[in-house]
Image (spheres, helix red, strand yellow):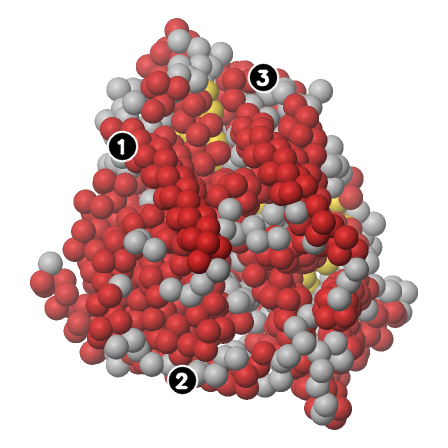
Amino acid sequence: MAHRLLDLGFAALLFGASIFLWFVADSFPESRRFAQADADYWPKIIFGIMALITGVLVIRSFLEMRRSGDAMQGAFTMSDDFRYTALRIAAMGGLILLYFWAFQTTGFILATFVFLVLASFVIPYRNMGMRFLFAATFTVALVLFFTRALELPLPRGVGVFYDLNILFY
Amino acid sequence: MLEAYGSALAYLFGNPSSFLLIIFSVIWGIAFGSVPGLTGIVGVALLIPFTFVFDPTAGLLLLAGVYVGSTFGGSISAILFNTPGSPEAACTALDGYPMAKNGQAGKALGIALASSAIGGIFGTIVLMLLAPPMAQFALNFGPPEYFALAVLGITAISAIGGGSVLKGLVAGLLGLGIATVGLDPITGTERYTFGNLSLLTGISFVPAIIGTFALAEVLQRAGERVSTKDVITDVSTKLPSMKEFLATRITLLRSSVIGSFIGALPGVGATTAAFISYSEAVRWSKHPEKFGTGVAEGIAAPESANNSAVGGSMIPLLALGIPGSATTAVMLGGLTIHGIIPGPLLMETNTQLVYTVFIGMFIANILMLIFGIRMARYFALVLKAPYALVGPAIVVLCMTGVYALNSNIVDVGVMLAMGAFGFLLRKLKYPIASFVIGLVLGPIAERSLRQGLVIADYNYWEFAARPITAILLLGSIASLAYGFYGQWKRHQQDRQSQVAAKHAG
Amino acid sequence: MLSLKTIPTAVALAAATLLSAPAALAEDYPSRTVEVIHAYGPGGGTDRFVRAVAQPFEEIAGQSMVPIAIQGGGGMPAYANFLQRRTDGYTMKAISPDQIIAHVLGRQDMGEFQPLARVQYDQGMIVVPADSPFQTIDEFIAHARENPGDLTVGITGAAGFDDTAMGLWNIETGAEVTTVPFGSSEMVSNTLGGQVDAMHEEFGPARGLIESGDMRPLVVFSDERLPVLPDVPTAKELGYDVTLGRWRAFAMPADADPDHVTKMFDLVSQAVASDAYQEVQEQAALQYRSVLLGPDEFAEFIEQEIATYTEVLTALGLVE
């Protein structure tokens, strides 16, 4: 089953990561004054224990998978339902990353409006006009609330976007 | 003292506008608390310039009202959208949102509100009656005691989550581990920044919880085929019935006591109080495995604790001039501008100011009940809107709030990373509660352990051989063992019943 | 809703045209809001400092000045934001010893700043709880010399300003103490509760506890005794050159127009001289040695600070 494989993979990843981070801690610069409980003291405890437990988890999920070995055949076939879900989540995740990039580059207004419109297509919804109306209203309301009422700065973007945004806030 | 209350009442009735101020500040506080990213600290800080218009007493009333309101406000969005509006409310989302998803949003909000008011009033009464002795008692808490307290909270991880114990522990350790990113609290050296100087202060708590809760939730719901907007149907907020209420009375009392005391400890505030009392609620519960699925105690514990911590954190501020939390630190700055010198003499020389604030906070908690119901109802209307609009709007609000909090784009990046990570943890059934407890209590545990060791000259025996520390540490070990035993026993029972079912089938 | 001013679109438009012009005329400067970036929380000491200057500044310059709080990241995000912005005279940065430390540690470069005005200059003290066995600084020093590292002193933050001040104390006096880094309020409660022997704190935040008799200052790190504490000796009069204090100041980008620098310093110095600002400064008990330094004197002062901090941070093992 796919989730068993994922479980094993994640536990193995954490096991590897905790060993790696333990050694990173080992290479922290030493402090003369606090040598007896230095910067690596606590992280080494944490990642040491974590390596132990995730090690056990890896072995356990491996054994479980062996036990139900025949279930492995279905591991790589995705059901339609799963594919649909994964696609939606990936689309939303991608849009959020795009928004994060645009947030800094084009400034708040443009990025937010476009994101609100695009993201509303990920989830089934019929009313086309409402999408745009809502996106516009919400963007304007936020700009007014943050920059006027609270006087907190919003990102202005870079280059030509900076000049454009400075007209508004 | 009676005389002091007399003059305080005389002030309040002599300045009827002060009642308006309290009303305004509670509403402002609830609003601030409920917007993700905008915390009570920002709410208080933004109002400080406006306090110049008023006399110091009215100014402090305004700030205290915001503090009271914002601590509750965060729970509204935590319950309705799994988006903790303020860090104090992160813990409330653990059971509040599942309860709302079970179709009982109104009940969840009602419990949160009633617990908040009770906790808040309890904290205020402690503040009124016990401020100087409590402040003195809190001074006995040095680094070893802080460490033991944090450990006590962390060990509850062993009892949390109906699933795998090992996964619970790993989730907790992940939280503890992530909390070590940034500048070392003792030596000031960089840890796990991998050359990225923007990570120097590490993974800030507010972006981290907004990511793990809110963003992960939006991702989750984006993948659902059926629109779940119909699931949360009951949005009318009503206070819990007397019977429901009495069922949580012990949790309420325990959490209020924990909250007001932890609030009184300088440097730890409402967020820690909420998590520790949640841990205790799980530990003492007869059905610990149900936590996280929407149980009343899981909402009552953190909400009563974080609100009683509000009164608690005013204790060291008013009795000693030491702020008990980040918000009271900002309030201290506000007092100074008004020419008031906070310190042990404040309660003697400015009796009217201090006692007016006591009464003001009392009124604010009662007003919170009234306005809280109303505001929660307005907020709940959002649930009727289609998720295609609400989901993206939550993302935008989280991004904007987190950005505006520190104007720091790195925080937004942290939030996104933690969103993806939280989503993964959820999918793989690692309990989020343990993860967040590790994240909150980890820094306190590490810092105070190492401070204590420096003071004790690295003598572990000297570190632990202090009455309060020893009791708390022994208690943690006992409960850790008991937690494992309980989980093991449940596991055995499950297996037996499975076997029995198989045989029967 | 609560906005104090709504900037009319016309002004904003005018500002935009000015922006596109290569250099704004000095007479018209400043013609829009001046933004002061700082690396601390809203409502914190630096935020209040900028606001205190901003209030009279607005009356004098006819333009507002607003603090932009870019918290966290050891001050790096604030620094990065400051460098990212264009040099047009409308972006300033509030700086403090933290920038000097970041410079010495190689994280920031003081060369990116055009020093404008040092406004506040505070003084630290060693403070003990009332029941401490040490009545005078001499007893404290004597004990520390006999038992190096035995005395613990609470400080705020790790490898920061307090650490440097106490590090300099250790170097200058040879009376070595062990520093224990805390958050600022925990530092006070741990000192009051007797968990540590003493703390390093400025006069302003500690005065409530001093006036009530819960704490006693033993020594003050300044050139002269504080008029409010006539009996507390300075380290200098005991023969130790420890006068390191926290300061708050304004800086502009290194390539700022010299005319803008002159004009801005003129405006800031008027604002600082105003009664409104002076009152706020006195309420925070920061008036004792807060002498306003102009661009040149301030630049010199920064040079000296860098030298001192480099020496101490090297001795502490934080710089190679």
Give the amino acid type for the residue marked by disc 1 in the picture: Ile
Point out the residue furthest to the left here. Answer: B2
Give the amino acid type for the residue marked by disc 2 in the picture: Ser
How far separated are the C-alphas under marks 1 and 2? 45 Å
Q: Earlier in the sequence, mark 1 or mark 2?
A: 2
Q: Nearer the viewer, mark 2 or mark 3?
A: 2
Residue at label 2? Answer: B236
- Seen at 45% across and 36% down, the residue is B445
Q: Residue A53: where, in percent of width, then height?
A: 56, 34
How far separated are the C-alphas under marks 2 and 3? 61 Å
- Seen at 12% across and 68% down, the residue is B6
Quarter assignment of residue C55: bottom right
The chain holding disc 1 is B
The residue lying toward the viewer, choosing from B64 and C220, is B64
Instruction: Describe the element under mark 3 as helix, strand or loop.
Output: loop
Residue at label 1? Answer: B471
- Seen at 40% across and 79% down, the residue is B106
